């Protein structure tokens, strides 16, 4: 009898939930266990809906729904953050972390409600389990949140509903239900926080301007994408007039809305502040020069691979090893930034995300003059996960290594940095995706022979992935003096092993999922 990969994936997720519960041990951690149990049952209903084509939207094929692993990310992240906020006595951030946990639970319950509502015949047993879990969660939340926090949860839910209706319709086959929950839920939360901070005051001169660039960029890109996706349904996008209109509206959105909005939030002119920030130290100038050289190298790899395709068969596709070159370039980009200048890396990652998404819009809408060349160049690097209108794997790679940098709680971090395994938290993306996933894929595809039951992944790939991440941890310990693992070596090894097993069995976007789970485990 063949082992079901979904069961092993679920077992790993339950293991992470138990780890968090053991470390936190609060009513909300009990709610996470209840949420995981009901998500496990609802996941099978979503899987059946996708197989039979009865789901409301078109989801990414050749993958399970991924509801359980995605449902647990935000709740577990909030619980892990809350522990550190309590330790440093930051009451505001402690309530913020509670809000993250509850919002994650409510989004997961909403997704479960949709599955149960459209499944025919009605799954009685699953409805009973989901009802019991939901009742326990709602009762605990009622005792935990204030009225203003409840309103904030409802606001995020409302934004999530509208974004889901719009983006899942405009982007068929781009996401699984779990990926949609994770990505659209995160965007909804960011947008709500930006609106909340914008309405709260006209700006805070003492606030770090760096924290506002990501939410403003995310909102601007979402508005740009939705506007032109709807507009180009009714008009041709490949003409020069349409392309000129696209570039003009992008400039108007950036200079007419986003820059003034940043000025309002930060009490600084963004361009002036950026120039001062970049030139503040020589280290930043050297890093930017080094990253520019890596960018040219990445472009050279793309052009070289496409020259092979032009000379040979039109069906030529880049191999797994070639695609992992970009993972290596990601390591070379992020590791020096993490060790030398994390604020600059934070800002550079926001800028890189903005450029990636803008170029993807240009490619998808065939905007002149770059739309057609980009479409031709990037087709070479497609894999089975890029089945929708957008090519997202390179964006997921960037998000995977950047999210731990963006999520690292500066206001909940002691002056000497996070102790123990927490010192590796900003490196979670580089470890899980840059090192672990790359080594597992290359060694598994070249020398792997013993396959994990029910999957194409190999034991050799997973074992070398764990070993490579341990070596990377040693290198980071030598290069970054702020890391002090103390007696937490066994916890680091256990966390890396659990995430490596998740990589072996998940069918979700591992570039996005693995760093978040490693981040959560290292943060405990």
Image (cartoon, rainbow, N blue to C red):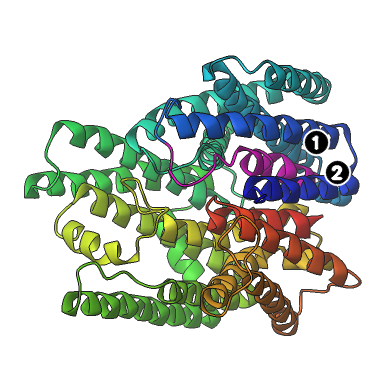
Residue 489 position (above or below residue 112): below
**Seen in the image, is 85 located left or right of residue 190?**
right
Which stretch is magenta? 59-82
164 lies above or below 523: above
The structure residue drawn at horizontal position 12% and vertical position 48%, both measured from the top left corner, is: 238
Give the farthest residue toward the front.
Answer: 1
Q: Answer whether residue 152 is visible to the viewer in this image.
A: no
Q: Main secondary structure of the magenta part?
A: helix
| Residue at the spot of label 1 | 33
Q: Do the residues labelled 2 and 1 touch (CB within 8 Å)?
A: yes
Question: In the image, what residue occupies the spot 19% across and 64% down?
Answer: 373
Task: Say if the magenta span includes residue 483.
Answer: no
Splitting the image into 4 quarters, where does residue 472 fall? bottom right
Please state if 51 lies on the left or on the right of 244 as rendered: right
Q: Would you name the residue on which mark 2 appears?
A: 21
Residue 460 image position (x, y, % from top left): 65, 75
Task: Give the answer, above or below, for where 55 lies relative to 203.
Answer: above
Distance from Cα at disc 2 to Cα at disc 1:
8 Å
């Amino acid at each position: 009898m063949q082992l079901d990969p979904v069961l092993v994936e679920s077992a790993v997720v339950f293991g992470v939930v138990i780890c968090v519960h053991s470390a936190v041990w609060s009513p909300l951690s009990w709610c996470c266990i209840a949420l995981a149990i009901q998500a496990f049952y609802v996941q099978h209903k979503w899987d059946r809906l996708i197989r039979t084509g009865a789901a409301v939207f078109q989801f990414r094929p050749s993958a399970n729904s991924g509801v359980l692993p995605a449902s647990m990310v935000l709740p577990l992240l909030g619980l892990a953050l809350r522990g550190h906020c309590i330790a440093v006595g930051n009451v505001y951030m402690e309530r913020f972390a509670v809000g993250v946990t509850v919002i994650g639970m409510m989004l997961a319950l909403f997704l479960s409600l949709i599955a149960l509502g459209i499944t025919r015949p009605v799954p009685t047993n699953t409805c009973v389990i989901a009802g019991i879990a939901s009742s326990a969660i709602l009762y605990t939340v009622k005792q935990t949140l204030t009225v203003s926090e409840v309103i904030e949860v409802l606001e995020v839910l409302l934004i999530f509903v509208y974004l889901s209706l719009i983006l899942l319709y405009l982007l068929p086959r781009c996401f699984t239900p779990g990926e949609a929950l994770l990505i659209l839920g995160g965007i909804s939360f960011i947008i709500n926080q930006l609106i909340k901070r914008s309405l709260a005051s006209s700006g805070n001169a003492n606030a770090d301007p760096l924290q506002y660039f990501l939410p403003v960029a995310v909102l601007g890109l979402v508005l740009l994408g939705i506007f032109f996706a709807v507009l180009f349904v009714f008009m041709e996008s490949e003409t020069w007039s349409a392309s000129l209109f696209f570039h003009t509206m992008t400039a108007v959105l950036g200079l007419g809305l986003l820059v003034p909005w940043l000025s309002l939030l930060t009490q600084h002119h963004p361009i002036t502040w950026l120039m001062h920030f970049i030139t503040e130290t020589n280290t930043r100038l050297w890093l930017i020069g080094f990253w520019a050289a890596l960018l040219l190298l990445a472009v050279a790899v793309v052009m070289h691979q496409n020259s092979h395709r032009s000379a040979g068969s039109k069906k030529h596709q880049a191999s797994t090893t070639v695609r992992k070159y970009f993972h290596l370039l990601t390591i070379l980009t992020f590791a020096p930034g993490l060790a030398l200048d994390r604020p600059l890396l934070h800002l550079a990652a926001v800028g890189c995300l903005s450029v990636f998404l803008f170029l993807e819009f240009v490619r998808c809408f065939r905007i002149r003059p770059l739309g057609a060349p980009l479409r031709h160049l990037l087709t070479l690097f497609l894999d089975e996960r890029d089945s929708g209108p957008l090519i997202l794997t390179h964006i997921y790679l960037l998000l995977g290594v950047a999210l731990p940098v963006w999520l690292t709680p500066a206001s909940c971090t002691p002056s000497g940095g996070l102790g123990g395994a927490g010192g590796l938290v900003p490196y979670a993306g580089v470890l899980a995706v840059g090192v672990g996933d790359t080594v597992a894929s290359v060694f598994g595809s070249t020398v792997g022979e013993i396959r994990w039951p029910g999957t194409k992944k190999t034991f050799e790939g997973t074992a070398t992935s764990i070993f490579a991440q341990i070596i990377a941890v040693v290198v980071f310990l030598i290069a970054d003096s702020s890391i002090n693992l103390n007696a937490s070596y066994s916890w680091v090894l256990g966390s890396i092993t659990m995430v490596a097993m998740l990589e072996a069995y998940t069918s979700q976007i591992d570039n996005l999922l693995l760093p978040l789970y490693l981040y959560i485990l290292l943060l405990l």
